[in-house]
Image: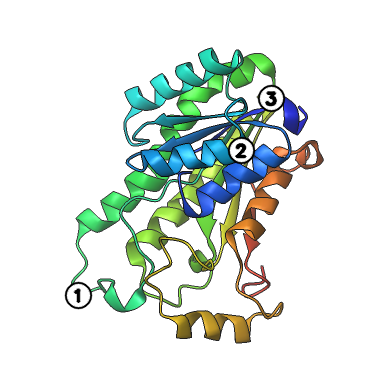
């Protein structure tokens, strides 16, 4: 399916990386569902930037199956066709500042549960909501957002890393189950991004260290990651599934 024929859901796309992804899809002609949980005004701003005839802002807590199902039906009614591509991007209750994160002696299971719910449970909900229509179309694209910290855990984001590591497992399991129905399931893992609401708490010196130690000598931006995501939604990726592409300027090579 060509990009301009797709209806794309980007979860958590009212700001930061999600907004960049939504706008990138809008630029190639896709219809875009801008999902948000609490940032209604920012979501509507993203819709206006894409175009009101091409995008819609829909509220849903991706941890709630009923709300996710309702969002999929609303999008289908609005655009006259079902969601064909899902980008599981929503980030739940997390900011990137290693100095303020709990380490082994102080971290609680509830923090792990929050990130597992935001990563794995949320992705499970969107996949279950979208599968039937994708099977009918014999086409679907799922792109899960990961992190290069799974391969290179240089900061104590224990709960976040664990959630994203689990999401790699779900990505590959679903790639195996859904491949025969024409549904590709992949992951794109960025590094620390310059600069989003989530990374605003990161000290500038950290960005400087990353820039100096990265082969491309730059800190990855949300737009850089969004471009890689477009590949996985495009016809060019038709023979690729179950993969985790790290987009961080070469900082982590795998």
Q: Residue at x 43, y 66 (%)?
A: 199
Label 1 close to label 2 by CB (< 8 Å): no
Establish if 138 lies above or below 179: above
Q: Residue furthest right?
A: 236
Q: Is residue 133 above or below residue 63?
A: above
Residue 84 sits in quarter: top right
Instruction: Describe residue 151's horizontal placement relative to residue 155 as left or right.
Output: right
Q: Could you tell which of marks 1 and 3 lies nearer the N-terminus?
A: 1
Q: Secondary structure at mark 3?
A: loop
Reading the image, the residue beneath label 2 is: 50
Question: Up-down: is 126 above or below 94?
Answer: above
Relative image position of residue 69 (x, y in whole percent): 41, 21
Q: Earlier in the sequence, mark 1 or mark 2?
A: 2
Q: Nearer the viewer, residue 51 or 36?
A: 51
**Real-space CA distance between mark 3 and mark 2, rounded to the nearest whole angstrom:** 24 Å
Q: Horizontal placement of 230 versus 16: left or right?
A: right
| Numbered disc 2: secondary structure | helix
Which residue lies under the disc numbered 1?
Answer: 105
Instruction: Depth check: give the residue in front, 56 or 164.
Output: 56
Which percent across, then down, holds residue 88? 50, 42
Give the secondary structure at mark 1: loop
How many marks are shown on the rendered structure? 3
Which residue is the site of mark 3?
A: 139
Q: For the residues carrying marks 1 and 2, which lies nearer the camera in this image?
A: 2
> Residue drawn 34% across and 50% down?
92
């Amino acid at each position: 399916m060509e990009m301009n024929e797709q209806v794309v859901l980007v979860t958590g796309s009212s700001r930061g990386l999600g907004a960049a992804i939504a706008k990138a899809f809008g630029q190639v002609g896709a219809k875009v569902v801008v999902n948000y949980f609490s940032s209604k005004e920012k979501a509507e701003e993203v819709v206006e930037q894409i175009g009101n005839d091409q995008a819609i802002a829909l509220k849903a807590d991706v941890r709630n199956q009923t709300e996710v199902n309702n969002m999929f039906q609303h999008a289908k009614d609005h655009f006259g066709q079902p969601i064909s591509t899902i980008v599981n991007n929503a980030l739940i209750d997390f900011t990137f500042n290693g100095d303020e994160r709990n380490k082994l002696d102080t971290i609680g299971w509830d923090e792990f549960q929050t990130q597992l719910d935001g990563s794995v449970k949320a992705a499970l909900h969107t996949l279950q909501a979208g599968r039937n229509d994708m099977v009918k179309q014999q086409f679907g694209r799922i792109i899960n957002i990961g992190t290069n910290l799974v391969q290179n855990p240089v900061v104590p984001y224990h709960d976040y890393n664990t959630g994203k590591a689990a999401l790699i497992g779900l990505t590959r399991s679903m790639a195996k189950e859904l491949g025969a129905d024409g549904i590709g399931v992949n992951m794109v893992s960025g590094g620390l991004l310059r600069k989003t609401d989530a990374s605003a708490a990161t000290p500038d010196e950290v960005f400087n260290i990353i820039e100096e130690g990265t082969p491309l000598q730059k800190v990855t931006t949300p737009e850089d990651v969004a471009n890689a995501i477009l590949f996985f939604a495009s016809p060019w990726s038709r023979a690729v599934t179950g993969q985790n592409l790290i987009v961080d300027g070469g900082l982590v090579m795998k």
